[in-house]
Each structure stands twice: as C-alpha cells, then as structure tokens.
Image (cartoon, rainbow, N blue to C red):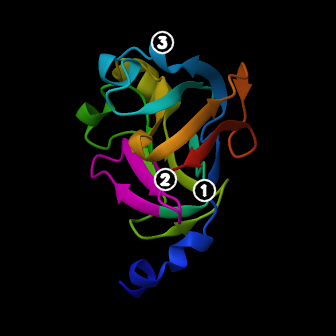
Amino acid sequence: MFKKLFGNNKNLSKDVEVYAPITGEYVKIEDIPDPVFAQKMMGEGFGIKPTEGVVVSPINGTVDNVFPTKHAIGLKTDNGLEILVHIGIDTVQLNGEGFEMLVNSGDKVNVGDELLKFDIDFMNQNAKSVVSPVIITNTDQTDSIQIHDDATLTRGTSKVIDVKLS
C-alpha cells in the first residue's frame, strides 16, 4: 500500500524481454489452431511447435497461477507484465496426464528456470495440437510489443518479444 501511495514502483523499468519458454518452431499467433488464441482474444503473443517437452520461464518474475490440470502456467514480472504459457491446444481435457509441474504459485523464477515437463509423444497422440501459445494477457497495459519471428527458438535463450509497459 505504501509503495503505491509514495510512488516507489516508479523505479521499476517499463521494458520487458520475453524469451522462448520451449524449444521448437516459431508459430505466428494467427496460425495457432485455436480461434481464442489466433484472434488475440487472450492477448498478443506467439506459438511454439515444440521439439522437446521442457518448459522454462520466459521472464524474471513470479509464478502467478499454476493450473490444476497442469496444462498452463501464468507468470508475472515485478513491473506487472502477465504471461500465459499454454501447453498445446485442448490439453485441459487431459486432466494433468502427461504433465509434471516443477513449481508452485508464488515461486520466484528467472529466465531459463524449469517450470514443467510434458510428454511430447503423449501430447501428439492425445491433444488437438502440440502448438503451445505464449500470450501477454494484459496487452492493454502495454505501450508497444515487438515480436521477433525467428524460425527456430531455443528455450531460455531466444528473445522473442520486447515489451514496453504503459
């Protein structure tokens, strides 16, 4: 409360770099095989067609939400940017099968820290798609979003988005 009253949050940078949370092939948001993501109803972002089943933190921040079905994880930077990493399409229906969560809500994470693992073969056989959306869920609180669409992404090292918060 005092930080808000006296403006101590003004010291935080408004620039955020978002890295690839999964190794794989870059997918434009419009090409994600789900209209909720492709039409940017959840926010701006991109997708990854994974080549391995490891998800790392794309930002420095806090684990904000671990979904009970382990198919998605919400993260938040100290300056307020919110990121959703959603593993595959229609994977909520798997009820956690094929996923191993490695973090809990409230955990502090840095770029490259492992968050969860998933069985990529199981996903290929049981999910609508393995393409995994990475979404800025509070796009309305940004001034600019620049997406770098490199063909191949490496988890924790490929910078994909530069964001300036409002």
Q: Is residue 120 left or right of residue 2?
A: right
Amino acid type of disc 3? Asp
How far is the residue under mark 2 from the one under mark 3? 24 Å
Tell which of 164 and 42 is nearer to you: 164
At 46% from the left and 14% from the top, the residue drawn is: 30
Residue 144: image location, x then y, percent = 57, 37
In front: mark 2 or mark 3? 2
Q: Which segment did they paint magenta?
A: 63-82
Spot occupied by residue 148 in the image (x, y as percentages of width and height) = 69, 27
Q: Give the mark nearest the N terminus, 3 or 1.
A: 1
Task: Give the class, few, some or many, for how many residues have Cα within 10 Å of label 2's Cα (few <14, many ≥20).
Answer: many
Left or right relative to 141: residue 159: right
Q: Earlier in the sequence, mark 1 or mark 2?
A: 1
Q: Secondary structure at mark 3?
A: helix
Q: Residue drawn at (60%, 42%), measured in percent from left and top?
A: 21
For discs 1 and 2, the disc positioned in front in the rendered view: 1
Q: Which residue position holds label 2? A: 81
Q: On the image, numbered disc 1 is attached to which residue?
A: 14
Q: Position of residue 7 (x, y in %)?
A: 49, 78
Q: Residue at x 57, y 19 (%)?
A: 27
Which of the two discs, 2 and 3, labels the residue nearer the N terminus? 3
Which residue was labeled with disc 3?
31
Nearer to the camera, 47 or 131: 47
Tell us which disc is closer to us: 3 or 1.
1
Q: Quadrant of the N terminus?
A: bottom left
**Above or below: residue 130 compared with residue 16:** above
Disc 1 marks a residue whose amino acid type is Lys
Residue 81 forms part of the magenta stretch: yes
